[in-house]
Every structure is written in C-alpha cells, then in structure tokens.
Image: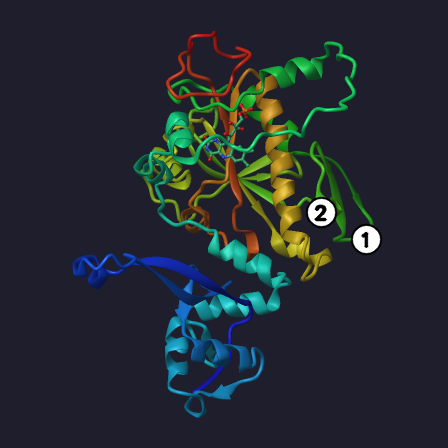
Amino acid sequence: MRVRRCWHLLCEPVQTLQLDVAALFSGAGQPLLNALCQWQALAAHLDGPIVVDAQQLELLGNLDRSCWTNLQALPDTARQLFEAGLLLAEDDVRPCAMRDLQLRQAHWWGPAAVLHAQSRWSAQDSVQQLAEQGLDRLDGLIATLGTPPPSGAASTGAVQLPPVTESTLEKLLERRVSCRNFDGQQWLDLADFSSVLWAGLAERAAVEHVSGARFAKKGSPSAGGLHPVETYLLVRNVRGIDDGLYHYQAEGHRMVPLGSGVVAGTDWQAMASRWLAGQYWFANAQVLVVMAPRYDRLQWKYRNHSKAYRAAILDVGHQSQTLYLAATQAGLGAFVTAAINECDVEQDLGLQPFGDGPLAIAGFGVRAAQMHIAELDPAGAIWQPGGE
Ligand SMILES: Cc1cc2nc3c(=O)[nH]c(=O)nc-3n(C[C@H](O)[C@H](O)[C@H](O)COP(=O)(O)O)c2cc1C
C-alpha cells in the first residue's frame, strides 16, 4: 500500500494536568498533579485532534504530502498514523480521505482550514455545558472568572465630541436589542418576512463584466464584492409559506424549498434546537437564517490567502447586522449566534464543510409579550424596567 501525508496539518504541543494517584496515596507530601506534555496533530480533514509521539511527529514532518511512499518501507508506527487518518492511501475511500482530496483541489490557507475544521461542533449542548460550569448566569461568570477587562481606553486627554441629533438611524439603533424571547406561536406576516430578507440579504443590483463574472450590490459590504455568503432558512409560522427548509436566492429575492432529504413529519423545533446547540431562547424564532459562505467563490480571488477566512467571517457579521436592523425596523426581534452545531446543519442541509459550511445562524421573529430570558436592554428600549 502506498501512502502520503494529508494536505493541511498543524502540530501543537499541549500540556494537561494529570492526577498522580501514587503520590495521592503515598502521603509523602509530593505534588499531586503531573504535567503531561504531548503533541497533537490538528488536520483540516479530521474533526478532532490526534495525539502523536515524537517518532510519529518526525515521520509526519519528513513524509511528502504529494508523492506516494510504500507503507512497508516506513517504521511500524506509520500504520497507526494511517489508521488515524493522518496518512492516506492511494485507493482510500474513507470519508476523511475524500475530504482530503477536496482540500487538495481547493485554495484554503492551511491554518484557516484547520481552524475551520476543528472549531465545528456536532451534537453539542452548549447550554448544559455552561450550566454545569456555573457560567450560564452573570453572577456565576463573575464568581468564577472575576470581572472582565474594561472595554475602552483610559480617558485622560479625551476630546469630547458634540452630541448627535436625533435621526431615523439613531432611533433604529436604539431599538436594536438581541432577542431571546420569541413567541413562536404567533404568525409572522409575509410582508414583514419579505422586507427583512430583502433589506438583509437581497441583491439590489448587479454588474456583469463578462458572462459569468457577476458582482452583486447588497445592503451589506462584502470582501472583494464577491458576496460569498449563501443563506438557508428554517421557516415556521410565516403566513402563506409552508414550514420547512429553503435556500434564499439573493438574485430575484426568491426562496427554493429544499424538499429532498427532508423526512415527512420532521420536528422543526427539535431541528432548530439541535442547530442552535440547545439555545432554546432562539429556537422559537419564526425564521432561522443559516449563513454559509461559498468558500470557492471567495478563494477564486483570495487563493491560499491568510485573510480569506477572516473576510468570510466579517461578511457574515455584516449581513447579520443588516438583518438585525431590518428586523428591528419591522418591529421584530433578531439574533445571531456562532454557538451552533455546524456538523448537524451541514448534514440536514447537504452542505460540505469546506465547500459551503456554515459559520453562524441569525434569526428573526415575533417578540414575546414577556421577558423570560435576560436581554441587554439597559435603556428600556424594548422592555420596561423591571423585566417586562
Ligand atoms: C458574533 C456574535 C455571537 C453571539 N452569540 C450569541 C450566543 O451564542 N448566544 C446568545 O444568547 N447571544 C449571542 N450573541 C448576542 C450577544 O450576546 C449580544 O449581542 C450582546 O449581549 C449585546 O446585546 P445586544 O445585541 O442586545 O446589544 C452573539 C452576538 C454576536 C455578535
């Protein structure tokens, strides 16, 4: 069998503390915790880190990632690297080998590809995890972590700027409060649904320099004018629209139902909750907007570029803010979160992690009459002081 190293690989020394059981029972007053130092291989085509020893690390460093080498000619330890997926064979049909092949044809900058792969979640319940650590409430956060470093710089020598005059934009910004209290039982009007999608995501105009080189104008800026972010909608209780999954087409302001692969009687609420890593305070929103950049479009221009992934994240952020403002203008609540189970979203929508894997989920819908989950509204723009 002939093998080669995977395409994108970073190795990091990690240090963990381990309980020294012998010292614990010896009573000799020795330190009870030992530092364990190990190398971790972080690959873009794998979902988690792989611990490697010094010999394997050296082997990985010496092996070609393009040319094939006979596995039999390598030290025995190479077989473990093959089994872990860090070495791939010529006729390898494992999913990790397929993903490695895709990465070879794409133009990802290695560290960004590794970051993208390794920061994806599958079936995580972030709410439960935070609760277990006592970090789900502000008092728990402060008790555990202390107070956060101050925001803003020291104020000596500051120049006072004139007060701003009231404007429509000012009033809109004042009312923008991340919503964690949706009333999922209410119907969302089709006109409001349409207006938020139009303002937040739609293509307003376009230029086509040559056939196939089309550049859209939207309400948000985009790196290179490429607008790589595609959006997928999970819709419930919108008047005139069937509940379900859709791809939003920015060109033409249309939605395409994603019928294939959707099981009849799908529990949309459960799907929403799974996508949102258990954040039940968002799961009731009538509309979830999955933001999934087309990386090949971005990397058409920014090939192997150290800033391309950053640009994708910023594009998603800009679109989310425009959605927030459009929803606020329509009297609706809005949110965005990066705490999502990317792997589950990909599976449900048929997305490829390195082709069009999601980075965030935004959403909007009808605000509840009462606040059950805390929102940051110190000015009382949405909620009366006292919580309602
Ligand atoms: C990138 C990003 C990620 C966020 N992720 C979460 C999240 O996972 N859960 C959540 O409840 N809120 C999330 N939020 C909302 C913030 O908590 C919220 O913006 C912040 O508390 C300030 O409140 P405001 O948006 O009402 O001004 C996120 C916001 C941003 C911009």
Q: Please report whichever mark, 1 or 2, sits nearer to the chain's N-terminal start.
A: 1
- Residue that sits furthest to the right in the current view: 209
Q: Mark 1, mark 2: which one is toward the viewer?
A: 2
Q: Quadrant of residue 291?
A: top right
Asked if residue 181 lies left or right of residue 361, the reply is: left
Task: In the rendered view, tell whether residue 62 sits above or below residue 330.
Answer: below
Q: Which residue is mark 1?
A: 210
Query: Residue at left 18%, top 61%?
Result: 26
Q: Quadrant of residue 27?
A: bottom left
Say which element carries label 2.
loop
> Residue 16: x percent and y percent?
38, 58
Q: For the C terminus, give its image quadrant.
A: top left
Badge 1 density bin: few <14, some 14–19, many ≥20, Cα 10 Å? few
Query: Residue at left 58%, top 15%?
Result: 175
Task: In the rendered view, tell whether residue 261 sits above or below residue 194.
Answer: below
Task: In the rendered view, tell whether residue 290 sits above or below residue 28.
Answer: above
Q: For the N terminus, give its image quadrant.
A: bottom left
Say which element carries label 1.
loop
Q: Which residue is mark 2?
A: 226
Asked if residue 234 lies left or right of residue 274, the reply is: right
Asked whether 150 or 267 is in front, the reply is 150
- Residue that sits furthest to the front in the current view: 28
> Residue 303: x percent and y percent?
70, 61
Amino acid on which disc 1 is placed:
Val
Q: Confirm whether residue 309 shows in the render.
A: yes
Badge 2 density bin: few <14, some 14–19, many ≥20, Cα 10 Å? many
